[in-house]
Image (spheres, rainbow, N blue to C red):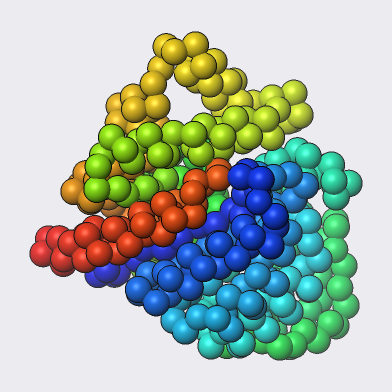
Amino acid sequence: MFNKIRVGLLHLFESAEGKTEKEFYNENIEIIEFADAVGLDTAWFAEHHFSEYGVMPSIQVLSSFVAARTKRIRLGSGVVVLPFHNPIRVAEEFAMLDILSDGRVDFGVGRGYQPHEFEGYNIPISESRERFEEMLQIIKMAWTEDEVNFHGKFFKFNKVKVRPKPLQKPYPPFFGASFNPQTIKFQAQKKMNLLFTSLLASPENINEYRQTLENLGENPDEYRICSLVFVYVDEDRERAIRDFEKPCMWYFRKFTQLIPAVKYPKSEDFYSNLHNILSEYIKAYDNGKLTFKYTVEEGPFSHGFLVGDPDYVLEKMRSLAQNYKLTDILCWTRLGGLDHKKVKRSMELLCEKVLPRLNNSQNAQ
């Protein structure tokens, strides 16, 4: 059972503000170093390729650099897109990272969802699930057995001695990402901790995840449930909404462009439907029929927005944690070109005026 809600950051390394890559890498890393200094629990990095949506081709490279610049914050892959990689290489590099970071790795994996990335690697998106499942088996084998012997559809290994082994035993915590709430149950079936976003999933999805674990003889209270949410804190609630509006709408537009409905097989109709929903939302916003304030405070995605003054953000964070039985909250604050100084100020307010009261309230329950 987890007595304290862990709070961390997610970084996509978006390139939205016209800065050089050197500048926005440095700004992201400065925020992560600050998070380490003030006691945030985790920093997660999302692998993405071939667009300004996320300039993060190698979580391993970044995490190694951050590990050397920080002391205690855990380093999460949020996520490694397994179908793009060789499983032995992934196992080697993350084992090495776990050693060099003194056992601070949280290993999050996913199968990817953006068609242009699969096209860039010349991998059919229809193969993503099978490739993912083979790689998952091989990585665990590489971390726990003397030799890897595997003969699958995509990978074949004979007596491969993989070293080093991770510092954490038997291996770093595994997290399965479910952007699509229909796949949350799958992560429980694989006995993985859960990464998801409350923007798209419901508390019922989480109840199903926990029930599936129970059916497998597992104690669901021993698994971490981590939700990604938009977080931006300002002393003035209305100003917070105004500051966050342009960066967030940039994100919605870019994300919608990268999940074109026509690019998915029928088995992936979730993304086609999501593309259509977001397209209609953006159209309504552009036509003045929906305001961003409505989106943040009342709309169907509002439970995934923690945007406002410290008291407002605290209450929404408490409610979110209780309704979704969260062990971790991942704050997505540096979004779509939001001014670096404003991001830092939001982080300071979050750490000074929200988080101390969050965990005090949890311990009192």
Residue 237: horizontal and vertical position, in percent?
26, 39
- For the point 35% across and 74% down, the residue is 39
Residue 95 in the figure: left or right of residue 159? left
The residue nearer to you, when weighing 80 against 284, is 284
The residue nearer to you, when weighing 164 against 77, is 77
Residue 7 visible here: yes
Residue 169: horizontal and vertical position, in percent?
54, 85
- For the point 66% across and 51% down, the residue is 19
- For the point 74% across and 87% down, the residue is 163
When asked about the image quadrant of residue 292, the answer is: top left
Identify the image quadrant of the C terminus. Answer: bottom left
Residue 116: horizontal and vertical position, in percent?
78, 39
The residue nearer to you, when weighing 264 against 148, is 264
- For the point 31% across and 38% down, the residue is 239
Identify the image quadrant of the N terminus. Answer: bottom left
When asked about the image quadrant of residue 88, the answer is: bottom right
